[in-house]
Image (spheres, rainbow, N blue to C red):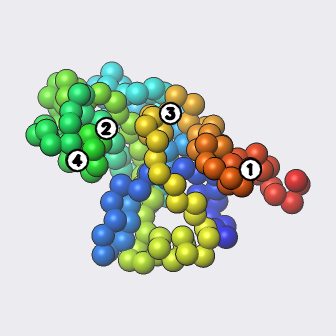
Amino acid sequence: MLVDPNFDHTVVLVLDVDEDGALGVVLNRPSPVPVDEVLPGWDGVLSGPDVLFQGGPVGTDSALAVADLRGAGADDDEPVGFRRLFGSTGIVDLDTPTEIMAPALGRLRVFAGYAGWGSGQLEAEIEEGSWYVLPAAPGDLYDADPERLWARVLRRQPGELAWVSTRPMDPTQN
């Protein structure tokens, strides 16, 4: 139902939802831009590929980093410059010096922009059938082959939803 090309065949990790709306990042749109060109020093912390990801159509002139803490449990203290979202995953303040953050981080991805929805917008899009809402699996955020992530996420689903993973980009050509 959603005809926005910004979200065609995307896997979006929803990071935050509250009464004002929702925020997420597109996981499967790597750009050709190396992170080191934009954020020198952070490339050594990345979970390849070492490029910026197109996180969404909003705020594309800014970067957002999502990371997992190295060996951290859900109740462990957060290092300076890290805000936990769920489990050991959180957002990294990229203004924090890498020498402070790097030892605490296990994996990291940097996104140019994000996906954002106003109050009730995402819920309405889900209700109209524009999104498949699925649980994230370990490794989705740091998938080594992000361009094939959409098909892999759908393929692991039970029943007919797995069939969607094989549909062509233009379903009328099926």
Number of dots carrying numbers: 4
Label 2 sits on what residue type? Ala
Position in image of residue 20 (x %, y %): 32, 74
What whole-number distance in Å separates the C-alpha atoms at marks 3 and 2? 13 Å
What whole-number distance in Å separates the C-alpha atoms at marks 3 and 4? 20 Å
Taking the spot 54% from the left edge, 70% from the top edge, the residue there is: 126
Q: Is residue 72 left or right of residue 59?
A: left
Q: Which residue is mark 1?
A: 163
Which comes before the other along the chain, label 4 or label 2? Answer: 2
Looking at the image, is mark 3 or mark 1 nearer the viewer? 1
Identify whether 154 is placed above or below 99: below
What whole-number distance in Å separates the C-alpha atoms at marks 1 and 4? 35 Å
Q: Which residue is mark 4?
A: 84
Taking the spot 57% from the left edge, 31% from the top edge, the residue there is: 145
Give the quadrant of residue 6.
bottom right
What whole-number distance in Å separates the C-alpha atoms at marks 3 and 1? 21 Å
Question: Circle 3 sits in a helix, a strand or a loop, which is it?
Answer: loop
Which comes before the other along the chain, label 1 or label 4? Answer: 4
Which comes before the other along the chain, label 3 or label 4? Answer: 4
Q: Is residue 100 left or right of residue 107?
A: left
Q: Which residue is mark 3?
A: 143
Label 4 sits on what residue type? Arg
Looking at the image, is mark 2 or mark 1 nearer the viewer? 1
Q: Which residue is mark 2?
A: 67
Give the quadrant of residue 128.
bottom right
Question: Circle 2 sits in a helix, a strand or a loop, which is it?
Answer: strand
Question: Circle 4 sits in a helix, a strand or a loop, which is it?
Answer: strand
Label 1 sits on what residue type? Trp
Taking the spot 41% from the left edge, 56% from the top edge, the residue there is: 14
